[in-house]
Image (cartoon, rainbow, N blue to C red):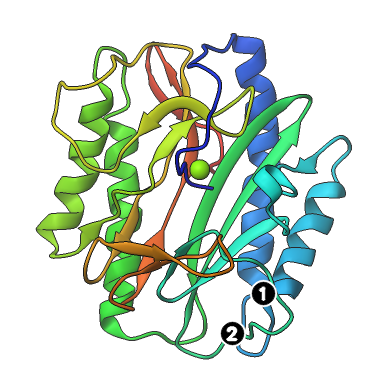
Amino acid sequence: MAFGGNSAPAMLLKSPREIEIMARGGAILRATLLKMRDAVRPGISTMEIDQIGEAFIRSHAGAEPAFKGLYGFPGSVCISINEEIVHGIPSRKRILNEGDIVTVDVGVKLEGMFTDAALTVPVGAIDALTQRLLDVTERALAAGIAAAIPDNHVGDIGAAVQGVVEAEGFSVVRELVGHGVGFSPHEELQIPNYGKAKRGKKLVPGLTIAIEPMVNVGTAKTRTLSDKWTVVTADGKRSAHFEHTIAILEGGPRILTGD
Ligand code: MG
């Protein structure tokens, strides 16, 4: 789930023990994303995908879907199709079609610690431009993670993401950003997907953050639908979203929601 300006507690560092709990929650989260990815096919509704995700999370002792009820969100999983960027509400009426792309964005709470991750999945065969959008967004996330090392700054992450995206002629969403995560789903530190190297807060070991490029084929501009949740591209062109929760350690970034 992306940060959209709600109030959140301050940036807080995590102990090695707390990071281990997050890694366990993150492993459940990753498996949940893959479970939902495997379920994606033409004809399935976004509500069915949400239920698969929620049931899988709850099949692990103590694990809960962190987004259910968060700020009043009605689903367990944010599920966004095509021009929907983030925060789509699961519905029985939203049916996936061949050639669509669908973003599943999930939070897991385990033993009081939160993790957050997302990926965009093709529905059957997709066109070449859409495939490039997915590839570039995933590559931008990897570049952002690689920049998340001690003594770098928040701006180094944004600059790395933005560099990959704009070199391909796509745009990064600015109204929504990554964020600190761990003791709560959204901690105060904001991680924009744009910026300048060496600017912003310094990255330190023990920081846990969600890096989440949201990349648009066309304009970076967004609007929010009348459901007050679903954020779409202003021009109706497609958008992709990949997200990991990572810990910044002395030796570099550790992906807590990876394989
Ligand atoms: Mg997030």
**Left or right position of 241 against 219:** right
Tell me the element at label 2.
loop
First-in-chain label (1 vs 2) = 1
Q: Check the image and report above or below for 169 versus 150.
A: below
Q: Residue at x 73, y 55 (%)?
A: 76
Q: Check the image and report above or below for 57 versus 51.
A: above
Looking at the picture, how far across and down is residue 242, in whole percent? 43, 53
Q: Check the image and report above or below for 163 versus 199.
A: below
Query: Which residue is identified by label 1?
Result: 46
Instruction: Residue type at mark 2: give it.
Output: Leu
Q: Work out how far the residue at label 1 is from the one at label 2, CA to CA, in angstroms.
A: 7 Å
Q: Residue at x 39, y 84 (%)?
A: 126
Query: Which residue is identified by label 2?
Result: 96
Q: For residue 252, which quarter of the picture?
A: top left
Q: Residue at x 72, y 59 (%)?
A: 75
Q: Residue at x 29, y 33 (%)?
A: 146
